[in-house]
Image (spheres, helix red, strand yellow):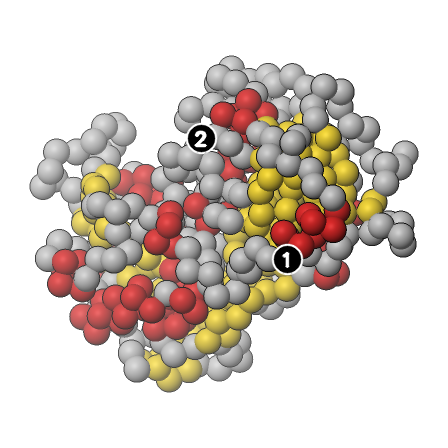
Amino acid sequence: MTAATGTTPWSPGATAPRGGEPPAVLVLEDGRTFHGRAYGATGETFGEAVFSTGMTGYQETLTDPSYHRQVVVMTAPHIGNTGANDEDPESARIWVAGYVVRDPARRHSNWRARRSLGEELAAQGVVGISGVDTRALTRHLRERGAMRVGIFSGNALPEQAAMLDRVRSAAEMTGADLYDEVATDRPYTVPALGPDGAPLPPGQARLTVAAVDLGIKGMTPHRMAERGIEVHVVPPTTTADELFALAPDGVFFSNGPGDPATADHPVALMRAVLERGIPLFGICFGNQILGRALGFGTFKLKYGHRGINQPVQDRTTGKVEVTAHNHGFAVDAPLDRVSDTPYGRAEVSHVCLNDQVVEGLRLLDRPAFSVQYHPEAAAGPHDAAYLFDRFTSLMEDQRA
């Protein structure tokens, strides 16, 4: 980085800019700047700079609503090999605010591909940058922490001082209330599936779940449907009376973006479910909501966990799982003791082995548990799929 400009120049260790694409600049809020070429749409975008360590599954990452208002830096150097298809997205659109890659594939190759990744980004208006030394950028974020960032390309290339001012005036993730912006605004139903994979007629489901959408991924209700469960996905504004009118065997709280400290209505809704003693399962944002409902605090991690290779220990079995993560906040709960809560005793059920961050909670006196990571395994790994079976067992035991 040059002392005069705070800019990282091209070096032999960096991927050379590809010809044809307009120049692009990435500007971090601390002033560090990276030059590259436009990838996807041209223009400008702002968000929180975070990095993902996944080597595969970029379509699932891009379409995960939890990445809303985040600019994702891919640590794997070669992205786009398999193009973009119509089967793997986790929602109806790309949610990342921007995309940063080192070496995009010049030619994609996969029998399911319908277009290149760059074409998909451009079609959905996602501003990206390629040719960046993503290793240097990732090391910088690890040392300094996730921070605001802007990507500028094409005609949106003002003077560097102006770019930095615009980045620093962008909204921060702390205090961001975002789940309403990504969730459904009307209920819908995902039917249960039979042994042959065909949808079961109404009334023939093994169980019924009400899933509170805080940014749900499409694979999550599908994993429950595979187990014969009919899933009623409801908006985050759903009231307790509306939820209970569905007479669910269990209630699920999904993943989602933003600061959990802003999610007062979901916390109140979860407390109503806990009062009723209905089996409850939460994933990611849902884990943070359970933490708040039990009286624990939440806090922002320095740079978060994102990727599909995070080691987590299930403390109830001692088993270590390789898991998929996407979270920048965590629950502040004691690891070394059982805690008394308004709903009985609670304990930390899962912990990240990299940094001892809380990765799961469970109540000992009521049928409720949650995990901070993504057992729906989109995209991989499948170590934690048993958690859907655990939820199913809770509901069947409660019904019995």
Residue 230 rendering spot, x and y as whole percentages: 20, 43
Q: At x 48% / y 54%, what residue is drawn?
A: 373
Residue 370 makes an appearance in the image: no
What amino acid is labelled 2 in the image?
Asp
Q: Which residue is mark 1?
A: 168
Extreme bottom residue here? 340
Picture disc at residue 88: 2
Q: Residue at x 55, y 60 (%)?
A: 172
Q: Position of residue 124 (x, y in %)?
A: 48, 30
The relative height of residue 22 versus residue 331 in the rendered view (above or below) is: above
Q: Position of residue 365 (x, y in %)?
A: 29, 76
Residue at disc 1, secondary structure: helix
Name the one closer to the observer, 274 or 367: 274
> Distance of mark 2 from mark 1, alpha carbons?
35 Å
Earlier residue among tags 2 and 1: 2
Q: Is residue 360 left or right of residue 71?
A: left
Residue in the picture at 37% in, 50% down: 181
Amino acid identity at mark 1? Arg
Secondary structure beneath disc 2?
A: loop
Left or right of residue 365: residue 375: right
Other-residue count near label 1 (Cα within 10 Å), few / some / many at <14 / 14–19 / ≥20: many
Determine the residue positioned at 47% across, 36% down: 94
Crowding at mark 2 (Cα within 10 Å: few <14, some 14-19, many 20+): some
Where's residue 33, x and y in %?
Answer: 76, 47
Tell me the quarter of the picture where residue 31 sits: bottom right
Left or right: 154 as drawn, with respect to 361: right
Is any part of residue 257 visible from this angle? yes
Q: Tell me the quadrant of the picture where the C terminus can be found.
A: bottom left
